[in-house]
Image (cartoon, rainbow, N blue to C red):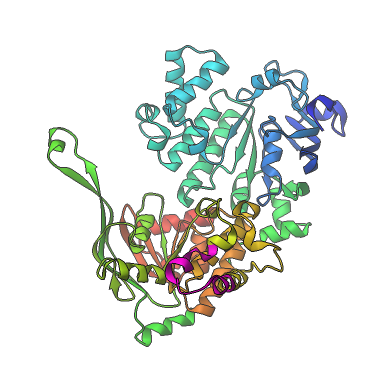
């Protein structure tokens, strides 16, 4: 299958169907080295319509969208992707049959794309304004000064504060939400007729997610453009899209209006996706631990974390300022219970977790099983690290690609149980992997395989096994499911709930997902700008929040 072998192929209604459609995709097949991954996909997009392409990781939705602009390296294509109109608004072009030169005239000009992670999509060596202006110069032929002015105006249109200053900023100097707004500004620079949005809000907090969705909705209506949204977030689809197409294993298994598909799903996979909201499965009876006078696993009082910053002007020659990232935090976590810490990016929740792990200097009292970091020297800290382990947000980056599964999971035993021999370590590794659903009978050669050979959910199970191998009392869960699809998220949360019931584990759960807090937490602590603005039992805080900020978070989560 290749573009050179491809021939244009009309839709089932012939040329007349294109009078009402912007894009008609028929029989799209995508393969790599003879292995087909997208199998005969059909869909259409009308002018001004919002179509959501939904599915889990590996379903083929991103490959399908990227194939429209032939942005998938070394891929073979078959089928047709007919784009109606153009600058002259006449004629039909098959995107899969165009030359690379012809496609360059369409990319960014008629079809633009928003990528999932703007930090990797932007060039770190150029300012955001220069990168937007470059697109304007190349595609619209505007002069340098005029293109710079337009870049600032585009940033202003997306709601970025101080657009002139932000235009002079580098990507790393912007927050996640600001980078995503800048990416949208770049995509809309040439007023495209079709916008491909690949998971545009996955990495954002719930309130930022709502803001970006509102922005896309407003800009879509004002520009009159069509949007092809690639996502696994069904709440986003419910709120944003007109129609939805559900993909599984490279095939579209169901499509229709959002109301039809969500209210009367026909395919079992669609029903499974709609039933994938996290379910509460924790034992609230664990509250009896407090009545028996159990020693807190983690306790803090007047906890503060400060970062040194430069003082502007001549005063900076002699003194340094301080940025307070966490201010006067106090909490108490008992065995078998989960404390959820929720807030937007920059609220201080991850800094609090680093302090709890002994990886960030702090002031105030912070004790693990009655012992503070550094109070008993390096030997004491090593004992604390055995009691307290961490599971990170992205298992792909937290698992070494150079170590096998067996080496990754047994690493903690080499440090904390050096008395064990190779055979004993191997048995402990097998037991830990089986406990998280990764038994060798299901995964032949498991211990000798490498992380890249597993899916996102499977890698997160490996990360949990690595943490459990040293039998800790407390797990710090730093956004443990935010990088996972909805159905995989539900499975991982159910696993964590089971492990807590069976082992009496305490969890410090860091997240911006209110649904995960509802499913997992016994108590919740809401943070904003480094301060704890509200805390208490999860039902009390989420059902009857006292603070406006908490109410805003809950409303944003319910809105999708």
> Quarter of the image containing the N terminus?
top right
Q: Nearer the viewer, residue 540 or 503?
A: 503
Give the number of callouts.
Answer: 0
Residue at 55% x, 38% y is 216
Q: Is there any visible trace of residue 328 in the rendered image?
A: yes
Q: Residue furthest bottom?
A: 292
Q: Indicate the position of residue 183 as horizontal and vertical percent values.
A: 51, 33
Could you say which quadrant of the image residue 485 lies in? bottom right
Judge whether residue 423 is colored magenta: yes
Q: Nearer the viewer, residue 40 or 165?
A: 40
Q: Which residues are magenta?
A: 409-427
Rendered view: 317 above or below 231: above
Principal secondary structure, stretch drawn in magenta: helix
Determine whether 475 is above or below 170 in the image: below
**Which residue is depicted at the point 57% across and 22% down?**
190
Q: Position of residue 225 (x, y in %)?
A: 62, 30
Magenta-colored stretch includes residue 356: no
Which one is in front, 220 or 108? 108
Locate residue 501, reporting x and y percent.
53, 78
Image x and y of residue 145, in percent? 42, 14
- Give above or below for 134 relative to 349: above
* Quadrant of the image occupied by residue 548: bottom left
Whether 128 is drawn above or below 499: the answer is above
Residue 339, visible in the rendered structure: no
- Near-viewer residue (281 or 235): 281
């Amino acid at each position: 299958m290749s573009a050179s072998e491809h021939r244009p192929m009309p839709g089932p209604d012939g040329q007349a169907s294109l009078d009402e459609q912007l894009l008609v995709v028929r029989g799209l097949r995508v393969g790599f080295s003879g292995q087909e991954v997208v199998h005969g996909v059909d869909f259409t997009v009308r002018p001004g319509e919002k179509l959501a392409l939904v599915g889990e990781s590996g379903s083929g939705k991103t490959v399908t969208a990227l194939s429209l602009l032939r942005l998938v390296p070394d891929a073979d294509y078959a089928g047709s992707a007919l784009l109606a109109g153009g600058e002259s608004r006449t004629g039909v072009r098959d995107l899969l049959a165009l030359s690379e030169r012809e496609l360059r005239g369409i990319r960014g000009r008629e079809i633009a794309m928003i990528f999932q992670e703007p930090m990797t999509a932007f060039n770190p060596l150029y300012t955001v304004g220069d990168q937007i202006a470059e697109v304007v110069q190349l595609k619209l032929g505007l002069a340098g000064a005029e293109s710079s002015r337009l870049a600032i105006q585009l940033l202003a249109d997306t709601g970025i504060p101080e657009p002139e200053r932000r235009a002079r900023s580098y990507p790393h100097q912007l927050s996640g939400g600001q980078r995503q707004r800048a990416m949208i500004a770049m995509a809309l620079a040439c007023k495209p007729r079709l916008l491909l949005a690949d998971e545009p809000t996955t990495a954002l907090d719930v309130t930022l997610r709502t803001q970006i969705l509102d922005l896309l909705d407003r800009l879509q209506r004002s520009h009159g453009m069509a949007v092809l949204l690639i996502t696994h977030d069904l709440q986003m689809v419910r709120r944003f899209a007109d129609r939805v197409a559900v993909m599984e294993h490279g095939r579209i298994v169901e499509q229709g209006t959002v109301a039809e598909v969500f209210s009367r799903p026909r395919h079992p996979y669609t029903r499974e996706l709609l039933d994938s909201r996290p379910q509460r499965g924790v034992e609230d009876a664990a509250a009896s631990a407090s009545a028996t006078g159990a020693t807190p696993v983690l306790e803090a009082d007047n906890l503060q974390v400060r970062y040194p910053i430069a003082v502007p002007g001549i005063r900076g020659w002699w003194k340094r300022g301080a940025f307070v990232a966490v201010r006067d935090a106090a909490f108490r976590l008992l065995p078998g219970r989960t404390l959820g810490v929720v807030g937007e990016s920059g609220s201080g929740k991850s800094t609090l977790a680093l302090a709890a792990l002994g990886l960030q200097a702090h002031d105030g009292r912070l004790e693990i099983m009655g012992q503070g970091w550094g109070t008993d020297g390096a030997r004491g800290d090593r004992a604390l690290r055995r009691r307290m382990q961490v599971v990170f947000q992205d298992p792909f980056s937290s698992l070494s690609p150079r170590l096998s599964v067996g080496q990754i999971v047994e690493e903690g035993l080499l440090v904390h149980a050096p008395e064990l021999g190779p055979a004993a370590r191997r048995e402990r590794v097998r037991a830990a992997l089986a406990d998280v659903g990764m038994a060798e009978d299901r995964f032949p050669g498991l211990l000798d395989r490498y992380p890249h050979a597993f899916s996102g959910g499977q890698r997160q199970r490996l990360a949990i096994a690595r943490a459990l191998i040293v039998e800790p009392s407390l797990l710090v869960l730093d956004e443990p499911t935010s990088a996972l699809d909805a159905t995989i998220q539900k499975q991982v949360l159910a696993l964590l709930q089971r492990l807590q019931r069976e082992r009496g584990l305490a969890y410090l759960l860091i997240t911006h997902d209110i649904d995960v807090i509802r499913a997992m937490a016994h108590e919740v602590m809401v943070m904003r700008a480094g301060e704890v603005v509200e805390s208490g039992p999860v039902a009390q805080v989420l059902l009857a929040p006292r603070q406006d900020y908490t109410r805003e978070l809950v409303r944003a989560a319910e809105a999708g």
